[in-house]
Image (spheres, helix red, strand yellow):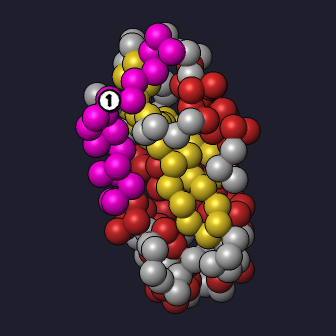
Amino acid sequence: INKHIALLLTEGMGLRSIARILRISVTTLLKRIITISNTVDLPLITPGSSYEIDELCTFVKCKRKRIWIVYAFERETKKIVSFNVGARTNLTLSKVVRKVLKAKLVAVYTDRLKNYRSLIPQCIHKTVRFGTNNIERENLALRTHLKRLSRKTICFSKSEIVLKAVLQIYFGGNQINL
């Protein structure tokens, strides 16, 4: 069942649909999603690569409670190597930036959000035009693929923990060891 859950989640199905298809309760499904996410590892950060970092806005519980998904995207392999969910603050951004900076990087491309200037060394920080095309395209794919991230929808996450778990499974992709 766990393999089916991971597959259906990565295909963008909603939780109630998955529960209906697998004939399990939504509560059981939520518990299994959290368990599965704990077994998923994101791809390793490759030294000597270039990365793009961007943030994506969504909401949890209600549309007034905005939350940001910050993630790092390796330009060569097109894999997401780190992400964090939280407010659009230096604390949320720094968790992703610190993980990426541990490897010896060629460059980190971001948009012109001023918070990045204090977090990323100027010698590798790039804010050139079209520097974040790949990650912006990934934002579009995420919004299209995962209903809970769509802008005008009635599907949304009711829990930050479940949102993180779903993203861990989605970003982990074929790294699932069940």
Which one is nearer the viewer's eye here, 34 or 107? 107
Which residue in the structure is indicated by mark 1? 128
**Picture coordinates of residue 126, whole percent (x, y):** 40, 24
**Picture coordinates of residue 82, whole percent (x, y):** 54, 37
User: Image height check: is 54 above or below 147?
Assistant: above
Which one is nearer the viewer's eye here, 94 or 161? 94
Residue 128 part of the magenta-drawn span: yes
Kindly identify the residue that appears in the image at 47 percent across and 49 percent down: 171
Secondary structure beneath dot 1 equals loop
Residue 170 visible, this angle: yes
**Picture coordinates of residue 67, whole percent (x, y):** 64, 61
Which one is nearer the viewer's eye here, 6 or 116? 116
Using a 10 Å C-alpha cutoff, classify the residue at mark 1 as few (fewer than 14 neighbours), some (14 to 19) or many (20 or more): few
Kindly identify the residue that appears in the image at 53 percent across and 82 percent down: 155
Where does the magenta region start and end? 122-141
Residue 111 found in image quarter: top left
Kindly identify the residue that appears in the image at 62 percent across and 25 percent down: 119
Residue 4 visible, this angle: no
User: Image height check: is 163 above or below 74?
Assistant: below
**Picture coordinates of residue 144, whole percent (x, y):** 35, 68
Kindly identify the residue that appears in the image at 49 percent across and 27 percent down: 44
Question: Residue type at mark 1?
Answer: Val
Query: On the rendered structure, is 63 left or right of 54?
Result: right
Residue 152 found in image quarter: bottom left
Residue 158 part of the magenta-drawn span: no
User: Image height check: is 85 above or below 18?
Assistant: above
Query: On the rendered structure, is 134 left or right of 169?
Result: left
Residue 162 found in image quarter: bottom right
